[in-house]
Image: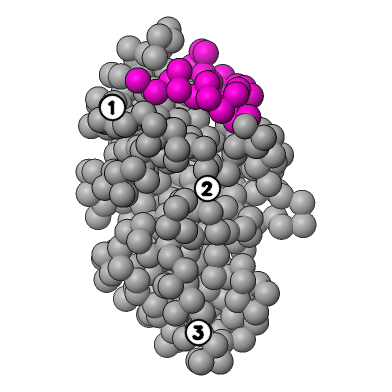
Amino acid sequence: MKTIEINIPNKEYKVHINNGLLYDIDKYIDVNREIVIITDDFIPKEYLEILKTKIAIPLIFEVPMGESSKSIDIAYSIINEMIKENISRGALIIALGGGVIGDLTGFIASVYMRGIDYIQIPTTLLSQIDSSVGGKVGINSEAMKNSIGAFYQPKVVLIDPKTLNTLSEKEFNNGMAEMIKYGLIADKSLFYDILEKDVKENIDYYISKCVEIKRNVVVNDEFDTGIRQLLNFGHTIGHAIEQDSKYGLLHGEAVSIGMSLMSLNTTYQKDLVKTLNKYSLPLNYKYDLEIIYNFIKTDKKVNNNKLNIIVVEEVGNGLIKTIDLEDIKKYLR
Ligand code: GLY
């Protein structure tokens, strides 16, 4: 087992990574608390069944799989139901699923009775290495992804790498895009491992490597005003493309295209193309420049017609660069 401490001042929590951890949930949380589980209708039913053997009759919400569940309507209906069921401020909500479930659950926890405890049990690679750590929670408005939300840290993150065994190849590769990002912005040897080795064979090690990189960033910049922005490499264009595709592209796939556009004419471009190909991640997408630009204009990171973009000039070393908003077009081709 590996435990990583996320030492955000006054909000410290642990990330436990352990195969078979789901079976031992009672070792990590007080199962006698009032518990609500939010999950989706796609994750293997056995995960819920395993939890049910240790947690007495929790209130369970099962939302449709996919980005459309990060909606105000779904958040409101769950909150309403929790109120009707007299769920108190002392309750704990468990997010059991991927990034959508983590973001939605964290958001509900952040506003329910002005904030209650929640924990993350991420079951996809993307959520295990990225979205379950760092407390970015939220839902989408019609016009913009993640535009309604908060920074609200979980009480603990419980990662059972065995849950990846039931993940489709496409979903696994979706998470690999974020792992590639970590390599590019912070860890050259991670990047070349991803290119040259069989990451799946040693996935526990790579999950913990990514969580450590994320920890190093978020403990120094919880609220995303500085160094945390490095995690956005490929994401400004990626988010725009993801929205343009009406979420037909998975997040990691859109980020893959974003990273590839941000890396044109760099020394490592060829290696990045090889790596993205290895994980069947897309390199390009047919888009209308003005439509993508209009999405970027509404990005949360735009301030006074300026935009912070992340550039990687050499592998392992991401940099934050402030540009005029209009100049993002140089990367759109
Ligand atoms: N996924 C980017 C962040 O947590 O800041």
Q: Residue drawn 65% across and 79% down?
A: 113
Q: List the residue tagged with mark 3.
A: 80
Is residue 147 depicted above or below 49 in this figure? above
Q: List the residue tagged with mark 1.
A: 284
Of callouts 1 and 2, the N-terminal one: 2
User: Which one is in front, 253 or 302?
Assistant: 302
The secondary structure type at the circle numbered 3 is helix
Going by the numbered disc 2, the residue's amino acid type is Lys
Is residue 37 depicted above or below 206 in this figure? below
Image disc number at residue 2: 2
Q: Residue drawn 36% across and 57% down?
A: 67
Mark nearest the camera among 1 and 2 is 1
Binning the other alpha carbons within 10 Å of mark 2 as few (below 14), some (14 to 19) or many (20 upward) gives few
Which quadrant holds the C terminus? Answer: top left
Going by the numbered disc 1, the residue's amino acid type is Asn
Binning the other alpha carbons within 10 Å of mark 3 as few (below 14), some (14 to 19) or many (20 upward) gives few
Residue 30 on the magenta segment: no
User: Which one is in front, 247 or 127?
Assistant: 247
Find residue 164 and report its horizontal and vertical position in percent.
31, 51
Magenta stretch: helix, strand or loop mostly: strand
Q: Residue drawn 37% across and 36% down?
A: 291
Going by the numbered disc 3, the residue's amino acid type is Asn
Find residue 307 and report its horizontal and vertical position in percent.
60, 30
